Image (cartoon, helix red, strand yellow):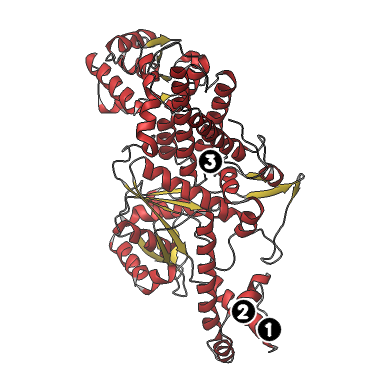
Amino acid sequence: MVWTELTEGLGQALAALGLLTPERLALVELAIPRERAHGDWTTNLPMILAREVGRPPRALAADLAAAFPADPERFGPVEVAGPGFLNFRYSARFLAALPARILAADAAFGRSDRGRNLAVQVEYVSANPTGPLNVVNARAAAVGAALVRLLEATGHRATSEFYVNDAGGQVELLGESVAARFAERIGVPRAFPENGYQGEYLRDLAASLPEAEARAALGSPAAGAWFRTHALERLVEAQRRDLADYGATFDAFVRESSIHDSGAVQATLEELRAKGVIYEAEGAQWVQTTRFGDDKDRVVVRANGLPTYLLPDIAYHRDKRRRGVQVSIDLWGPDHHGHILPLKASLEALGLERGFLEVLIVQQVNLMSGGQLVKMSKRAGEFVTLRDLMDEVGPDCAKFFFLMRSANAHLDFDLDLAKRQNDENPAFYVQYAHARIASILRYARTRGLEPGDAGASGEWHDQELGLVRQLAAFPEVLRGAAAAREPHRLPAYLMETAATFHRFYHECRVVSEDVPLSQRRLQLSEAARIVIRNGLALMGVSSPERMERGVEVEP
């Protein structure tokens, strides 16, 4: 990986100048410049270190450039620019050889072992099992699944988990709501609970229950518990099915009730007490989270003896760590923002590593059509379901649109744009580029031409060089997206890659009478197809070889 090689080269240059320390090497920041005139990679390391080492930044940059190990297979001479930047450019040899390397690597191109097999778990969606999944859940599913794939692609031991919140008042209310709907269905009087769950899905659920058993349960004192249990099983299974159809699968579904039933909640409280961070006040039991950066201590057991939401959450994450998870990345909704600091502080109080828990907030989604807010679902109450959205625009387009913006930014999802089958639709635009390349390759085969390694022979067009440089950035995009937990970098890169390919295609004839040139450009086109396919796969989006009927793809 180029990022690693540049970092190692800068380390060698620092060592040659007698300036290498682990702390200084950790300060290395490398970026791909927006303007090609600034090279293929750049770093401001000389400016960062100048004051500490007592050297003018530009003079330090010149010495580092001179000491940087020569690598003509990959880089040209290092350039000093501006007040102290170091710019690196790929060598012509590297650029000429890259398409063949991409074809050889195929699905593995872009992957690395940067994560060093670190056990990272992504817990995402984890919606309350009280109804169908909504569009915010759909956004979380797109982000979480893409993040798991990115972590796997960068050498992490990544797993996924769905935490089923099946304990507490919300599920008790669900049971009472379903019992009331079943009673309504068979004509038995039963009051609907105050603030009960609404939506036609409850009537459907009540109708799906085994009638004889449900009738018997309705007249028993434990009616709520029976209906709660059966409703939960059906709703969790429906959520799992919708997510699977959406392309989001999980290594484990863990139920909050199992944490309680196992005794882990009480054991966690006792462990916190043994560490001296539990005290009693006002009849309740508190954890001293202020000792670990929180703005106030938190109640973990109420005066009535029942745990707050915080204690089972601590127990759940304690269980994760005991299962071997080294980093837990949780995707939460915006209404849980205030829970982040208390939980992190509580886990640190318990003795877990400070960096064990990372929380990403997935912000709200507004579905828009004609500039107006859309509410499509009649059966689920006053919200749009994941299933509605898949039926409306398809899983591919939904995921692409959700991943185009940072998860912590509000998103206006333009349904009209998502339905367009033209270049205005970003998902279509990228998939069309992949299909166009496949069409070019099919056409070439009718002419007896296949991608071939023509090496550096012949002069390269500027658009060829621009495309190969764009492809060279793919491994760094994956590394950076995984490290920053920012899957939205992928669609941004793929849209630019598609645009770069289209520019190349319009200015450079791929299949011509010049066989060596055709082979070289076919090889470059195939390399672009592989990169687009690999990137879409990480997003959970398909790479069509042909577009749908009615959409013409020209070779």
> In the figure, 94 relative to 249: above or below?
above
> In the figure, 424 relative to 45: above or below?
below
* Neighbours of disc 3 within 10 Å: few (<14), some (14-19), many (20+): some
Q: Residue 206: give its label.
A: 2
Q: Is residue 324 left or right of residue 400?
A: left
- The residue to which callout 3 is attached is 545
Q: Are marks 3 and 1 in contact (CB under 8 Å)?
A: no
Question: Which quarter of the rendering shows the C terminus?
Answer: top right
**Amino acid beneath label 2:** Ala
**Amino acid beneath label 1:** Arg
Of the two numbered discs 3 and 1 in the rendering, the one whose residue sits closer to the viewer: 3
Q: Is residue 422 left or right of residue 451?
A: right
Q: Earlier in the sequence, mark 3 or mark 1?
A: 1
Q: Secondary structure at mark 1?
A: helix
* Neighbours of disc 2 within 10 Å: few (<14), some (14-19), many (20+): many
Q: Are marks 1 and 2 in contact (CB under 8 Å)?
A: yes
- Point out residue 9 in the picture as x, y percentages from the top left corner: 29, 20
Q: Is residue 130 left or right of residue 108?
A: right
User: Can residue 48 be seen in the rendering of this structure?
Assistant: no
Q: Residue at x 45, y 51 (%)?
A: 341
- The residue to which callout 1 is attached is 185
Q: Earlier in the sequence, mark 1 or mark 2?
A: 1
- Point out residue 237 in the picture as x, y percentages from the top left corner: 51, 68
Give me the C-alpha separation between circle 3 and circle 1. Answer: 50 Å
Give me the C-alpha separation between circle 3 and circle 2. Answer: 44 Å
Of the two numbered discs 3 and 2 in the rendering, the one whose residue sits closer to the viewer: 3
> In the figure, 448 relative to 285: above or below?
above
**Amino acid beneath label 3:** Glu
| Most foreground residue, 162 or 168 | 162
